[in-house]
Image (spheres, grey):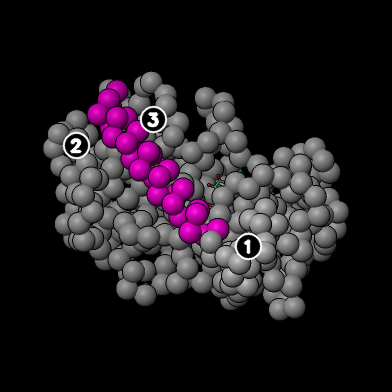
Amino acid sequence: MVELGLPLGQPAGDSGSCGSPTRHLHESYILGELLGRGATSTVYKCLFKGKKECACKILKKSVLDRRRVESELPDLRELRHPNLVEIRDVFETADALTLVMEWVSGGELLERIAERGFYSEQTAAKAVRQILSALQCLHSRGHAHRALRPEKLVFASEAEESPIKLLTPGLGVSSLLPTAPPYCAPEANKGAGAGPASDMWSLGVTAYILLCGFEPFSGENGSASEPLQPHALHFPAPWWDEVSDSARDLVTQLLQTDPAERPTAEEALQHPWVRGDTPRSQHMDATVRSLREFNARRKFRAATQAVVATQRLVSPEKRLSRVLGQVSPQEETPPHVHDDRPGRC
Ligand SMILES: Nc1ncnc2c1ncn2[C@@H]1O[C@H](COP(=O)(O)OP(=O)(O)OP(=O)(O)O)[C@@H](O)[C@H]1O
């Protein structure tokens, strides 16, 4: 067993929550449905003591950035911020690290915007303000998120006024970082490593999408995928015609190619559009329509990637056995999950 040297015996957080002093996941948690599968992890719904809902993220040790886990995870699990998903417990087995997290059930930010009737710059600014607040908390303690993209932005609950939560930062080695262009900052793309300024770039891309419903640096309306040209930021008509100059100014500042030129999270929180002084209040109908198309494209891509990820998790021996007809797909369990799956909801 490759020990990561983490202080895993004690739970973080309040005693009435998901935390448990046990070191064995199955003694306190029952694993439920699969929620998602990324490059470095698999996420399941789980129940604490058969009752309280949590999310359980199982990370393969083989793809973890060991230095980052050792230096950052102890602090990350202590963080308490209204816009960050809490890590409530951590377990380590021979080949996996498992994070038990606060359960969030309000759905993705972009999905809600596309489903609800009214949407204005004011709503977008409120979302950006909350994301910035989460980033400021992370950055002020020396962490970067490194995987900020729309899929990581979820509402805590179904309530209309629910806060937005930023899902847990990635802890995988950089070659497996799930953040692809355009979310991945130019410096990180060039192998310089992603830091707080790279998060600000990812936020710039997210803010751009929130304002027009498609990604920057793609084709018109996000339809064609041209080579990424970070310097060629533009605001195509007619989609950007009704967006305020102040919103464009923020996006332009965040999407500067030179990371040193981008505002910090603290500085961006002082921008008049973020503070709520300048965002427009009119409904952005074209943006909502574009967002619906954007969400449909993302879902299709995610479904395709999930199939590929599932294929990768099946061992070569089992793949061969399957071809030879010796193992049915139902018998297979992702190898890194096997040890920790005593029961299901
Ligand atoms: N705390 C949570 N509560 C509810 N659902 C969650 C929670 N965390 C993650 N999920 C669900 O699991 C999915 C995958 O989560 P997440 O993006 O963190 O992992 P990932 O895809 O493996 O990414 P990464 O490789 O960046 O770690 C999310 O899209 C979300 O639906």
Task: From the viewer's perspective, tell me whether residue 101 is left or right of residue 262.
Answer: right
Question: Against 236, is 183 above or below?
Answer: below
**Residue at the bottom extreme of this rendering:** 2
| Alpha carbon separation for disc pair 1 and 2 | 55 Å
Main secondary structure along the magenta-highlighted residues: helix
Where residue 24 appears, x then y in whole percent?
Answer: 83, 60
Residue on which disc 1 sits: 325
Residue occupying the point 52% across, 24% down: 160
- Quarter assignment of residue 240: top left
Task: From the viewer's perspective, tell me whether residue 255 is left or right of residue 305.
Answer: left
In front of the other: label 1 or label 2?
1
Q: Residues within 10 Å of mark 3 (few under 14, many from 20)?
A: many
Residue occupying the point 23% across, 45% down: 223
Where residue 201 appears, x then y in whole percent?
Answer: 34, 57
| Alpha carbon separation for disc pair 3 and 2 | 18 Å
Which of 39 and 74 lies nearest the eye of the viewer?
A: 39
Q: Residues within 10 Å of mark 2 (few under 14, many from 20)?
A: some
In front of the other: label 3 or label 1?
1
In the structure shown, which secondary structural element does the residue marked by tag 3 occupy?
Answer: helix
Residue on which disc 3 sits: 114
Residue occupying the point 73% across, 62% down: 338
Badge 1 or badge 2: first in the primary sequence: 2
Question: Against 198, is 68 above or below?
Answer: below
Over which residues does the magenta segment extend?
283-310
Is residue 75 shown to the viewer in this render? no
Quarter of the picture containing the N terminus is bottom right
Residue occupying the point 15% across, 42% down: 236
**Residue at the left extreme of this rendering:** 237
Amino acid type at mark 3: Ala
Amino acid type at mark 2: Trp
Badge 3 or badge 2: first in the primary sequence: 3
| Alpha carbon separation for disc pair 3 and 1 | 44 Å
